[in-house]
Amino acid sequence: MVKPLTRKLFRDIGRHRAQFIAVMVTVFLGVTIFAATYDSYQNLVASYETTFSEYHFANLTVAGGDIEAIAAAAAETPGVEAAHSRTIADVPLRADETKLLGRAVGLPVTGQPAVNQLKVLDGTYLDAARPGGVLVEEHMADHFGLVPGSTVEVLCGTDWRVLEIVGVVSSPEYIWPARSRQEILTTPDNFGVVFTGESLARELAGVESPNEVVLYYENGEPDEALSVELGVTARNLGATQVYTRDEQPSNAALSEDIKGFEEMALLFPVLFIVAAAMASYVMISRFVYAQRPHIGGMLANGFTRGQVLRHYLGYGWIPGLIGAVPGAVLGVFLAGVITRLYTGMLSVPVTLIEFHPTTLAAGVFIGVLATLLAALAPALVASRIRPAEAMRGETPAGRGRVSIAERLLPPLRRLPIRWRMAFRGIERNPRRTLYTMFGVVLSLVLVLVSWGMIDTVEHLLDLQFVQISQEDAVVYFAAPVGIEEVAALEAVPGVAAAEPALEAPVTVTAGDRTYDTVLVALEAGTEMHNFRSVDGSWIELPDEGLLLGKALGSELGIEAGDVVGVTVAPLGITVEGTVAGFVDEPLGTFAYTSRQYAAAQLGGSLRVTSALVRYSEGADAAVVRQAITELPDVAAFEDADALYDVMNRYMMLFYGFVGIMLVFGAAMAFALIFNAMTVNIAERSREVATLLAVGTKRSTVSRLITAENLIVAVAGIPFGLVAGYYLSAFFWGSFESDMFAFDLYVRPATFAFAGLAIVVVALISGWPGLRALRRLHIPTVVKERSS
Amino acid sequence: MISLNGVGKTYGEGVAAVHALRDVDLEIPDGELTVILGPSGSGKTTLLNLVGAIDDLSSGSLRVGDVDLAALSADARVDYRRTQVGFVFQFFNLIPTLTAAENVELVAELTRGNGAQRARTALEQVGLAERLDHFPSQLSGGEQQRVAIARALAKEPPILLCDEPTGELDFETGRLILGLLRRLGRENGQTVLLVTHNAAIGEMADRVVRLRSGEIVEDRHIESPVDAETLTW
């Protein structure tokens, strides 16, 4: 049988269901987001880890130098389970009449390699009986519609060789098809990977022996000390590039994404749970205030203070539990959906969706704990009430005083009394006013962190593709060419200008620190690329010295004027260069220099690996592309707009995410302001009824209360905008790396819209309270002893 | 003149219906101080609320002068409350964030002229000229009730409706308030309806109407009302 006190609790909840529902919904949203994001994070980590161990994803990759000696030394090093030597050839490919930058990865034809194994999605693995057979990485296969039996062409010397596709595969190395750490963003039109027999890869690369070794540690466990040891050994044997699993381009890009889930799993739920706790606190405080005579009666009739305490704690944890349980269940379910969508979109070879009872329990625990803590202070107040005083129905008198606003701005004292009332009403319950303002702050943080992401990424794209990159396309040559081939490009109809460029993988060394990047040598007065210094000003590419990506300053501990070593991997030579300055670019960390300086440092005349092209006004990009790709020396054509479009397509996901967060933010703000306003009206019902009884119009009273709530909401907006901005900067700053520079940018209009949205939500959330005002029975309320 | 003809008021429906007033006929001439007596639930406050147009009658008719309250629109009722009646409640119902002067001025502003001046005058009338800038929490119960009376007077309404005005006050303060109501009513020529369950208060009235279970059980004129200061209970 249900105890009377429990019945009272549930009836109170039923009577004030709108306020309790507001708390429940906020808890529900917070716990759902927590469970969905945290479980997705766990699932994705597990999916990647399983993929890595199942397909023996390399712990360390070493390129250049005496690969066979490095492999032999590594194989004998304790802790290394397998060392696999192979050949990587960056060669032009042609698929479906499209030329693109390709990569051929050599594999043993007798069976899967010991390291970096493949998952065959369609067809078969390589077969020694079919020496011309290749495997195609699935991003490329999907884009060009390649299936077993189709063909792909690869440039071998000066001839295009037709290869038959025997299988479509996915690889742990190319889950995110990054060409290099500096070229994280690629399009399938510009970059594709094929896996060939090792002998064919060597032929394509023009080498006699492997040029890369991949190492897998025992059980695939990362071992930093081992990596350092092997790195030193490798560099002593002439290695030009050494990178760990964490630094591997694809994995590094994906890690940023995973980190996003981890951060979201913390920040967003915290916002909601705190909001729910506040809404709960405001509501329960009001109940205790209004039920003082009942509490006095309970205590006078023998209820213990503990029973009263537990009773009022129930107003917290019960709605918390009701919101948290379905939230946790839905969150865990959604985590499965999100994980499947994510791994499906990225073609992660293994999708692991596990049920984590701890997430479910943690979600429920967080929801219940937050609301329980919110109820604690008012419940303690209830348990400490003095029965005799409480039963007399005398509530502590509200202390009146001139508002701070009136004291600071004396002309406000000349306002009509009812508007002075609005100002003083705000200070009547300072704690509730502060909580309401804090609710506004929380809502704005949520909105700005989400909306700030759109602004930041849009700004980042504008900076990279509009302000920095000035070329319309990059043309890659099949082999280094002379300056005359660039001039030939200018003869193509639709091309207004073409500038030569040299791109070479290099290792920059300062002391014992190294950094692998791409050296880009451009004309000193280049019009194809603008350079933005770290202070945001625009600078020229100097005739002398190197302009380095700003991340290199901290990575290598260098500053302008220092001399660094530059090892050019393809040439196997190391030269010195002076750091002329640093550039701030959103994507990648490159090393720029003038062609003249590069030629002087490297010696001899500088060849050209690519050309930066600008179209004539009104030129048809497709026609220009067609004409250029038909030129015999051209290996690939990268349209600047294509990358921009790819990024914009990814933005659609952002818009969806931000849309959801805006709805959630609005719901949170609504719940908080609704509860605060409902309590405000309830607490002042006798005052309102008196005003109505003496002849004040309901519309005037409505305006008065609306004004008071709006003042509180508006007062919270500046704090919310500042807090939102700095928290967004902190949140997005955590994604900053040498691959991406996430400098927060929020448009002024975003601040304005966010503030306006809060005002609108405040107006809407006050509406139910004002409706209740219309139903106020004046005779009853004016006779009540306490409100 | 306040005229009630066959006035009935029922709360709720069916078996839960409560008949607060049943077929009440009453005429109160202008300028009279009428005490409405009765135990709890007798309908006295309901009667007051109907005259004050803060509640609707269920049957019959109620006229104040030429005005038929049942026929008034919502806006007209607001206007009626602004200009025709002043309320004094048992629990004072002052707004805690406004000073004594502001509480009165708030209501005075609703009507016409210089609200601040009328508020000051009303507070002087109730003897609170020195306490204008005090907030309710800084005033005693009696002082708060005097502010409430000043608030009712500030609009200069022809009718003063007082619901248990001494209910929350000690004996001495209660007598003081009653004397004030008697004196101001006379000075201003106001009709005063004073609801109480304290029969002794009836001795200071021009007329006593006793209610029981929603019906008038006694309606008598007092030939020689006593001074409030001499009342005892």
Image (cartoon, coloured by chain):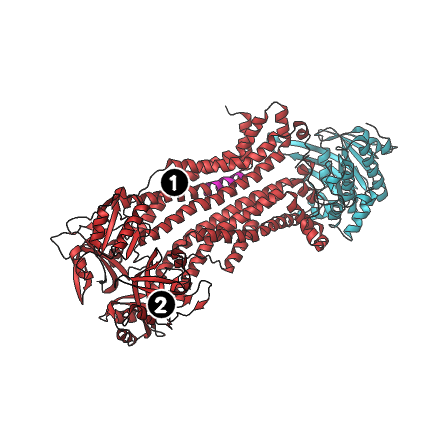
Chain colours: A red, B cyan
Q: Is residue A446 above or below residue A600?
A: above
Residue A35 point in image, percent of width and height? 41, 41
Residue A395 point in image, percent of width and height? 67, 35
Residue drawn at 60 percent across, 37 percent down: A286
Which of the 4 image quadrants contains residue A553? bottom left
Type of residue at label 2? Thr
Image quarter of the C terminus of chain A = top right
The chain containing the residue under callout 1 comes to A
Mark 1: few/some/many CA within 10 Å (<14, 14-19, 20+): many
Residue A590 point in image, percent of width and height? 36, 62
Left or right position of A530 against A775 = left
**Secondary element at tag 2:** strand
Residue bearing mark 1? A332
Residue A19 within the magenta-colored segment of the rendering: yes
Instruction: Provide the residue span drawn in magenta.
Output: A18-29
Residue farthest left in this picture: A129
Left or right position of A650 against A304 = left
Residue A150 visible somewhere in the drawing: no
Residue drawn at 26 percent across, 75 percent down: A484
Closest to the observer, B81 or B165: B165
